[in-house]
Image (cartoon, rainbow, N blue to C red):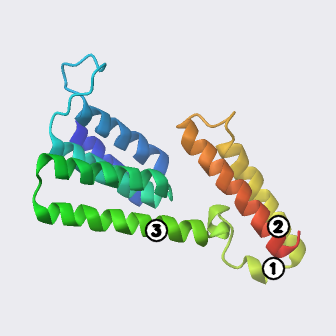
Amino acid sequence: RSRILLKLCAANSQIKRHEEALISCDQAVELRTVSPGDNRSAAVFVDPAALREALKTRAAALQLDNDHDEAVRDWSRALESARESGAAPEEQQDLQRSLMQAQQNKRVWDERRDHMATLELPANLQQLAPEKQCSWIKKQHRKLARKWHPDKYRGNSDRGARKMREVQEAKDVLYERFRC
């Protein structure tokens, strides 16, 4: 079952259905973390390689969702698992490279966020009249604020709060840039 969930996670992530992808990934990681007969009170690792596979898939999905902090955490857990279980040196090197890439993506995201992409604004926004630019920003902010507001969002509350902060920051930066 966890293999199917990982495939769903990867597929949904590629088509930018991140919420469904992350739900599938979380379930797969949970299934691979606890024993099938467990009452889920104590986490007993079943197979370190299977857990690493689930963590790698979830980390990739998190990176596509621009949640770089959690992606770095998952890559770190996967690398730690590989070192503890004595995985092949090539696999450890691949995980180390992926972790370094995720850390680089996090730095780039923190320094140069694409606020227009965050608010899902059209590419030709800068060609519009100033009042149209401001109305687009306001409209998209309202739409995404309704979607991600902590009182309305039904998914993972941490993800909703993070997305709401990103939307608010994007609106503030773009209002200043376009002098709305």
Which residue does the numbered mark 3 point to in the structure image? 105
Secondary structure, mark 2, is: helix
Left or right, 81 with reference to 118:
left
Mark 3 residue type = Asn
Which quadrant: the N terminus? top left
- Residue at the outermost bottom position: 127
Q: Is residue 155 left or right of residue 114?
A: left
Q: CA distance from mark 3 to mark 1?
A: 31 Å
Name the front one of labels 3 and 1. 3
Tag nearer the camera, 3 or 2: 3
- The residue lying toward the viewer, choosing from 85 and 152, is 85
| Element assignment for label 1 | loop
Q: Are marks 3 and 2 in contact (CB under 8 Å)?
A: no
Could you say which disc has been placed on residue 128 in the image? 1
Front label number (2 vs 1)? 2
User: Residue 64 in the image: x percent, y percent?
Assistant: 45, 60
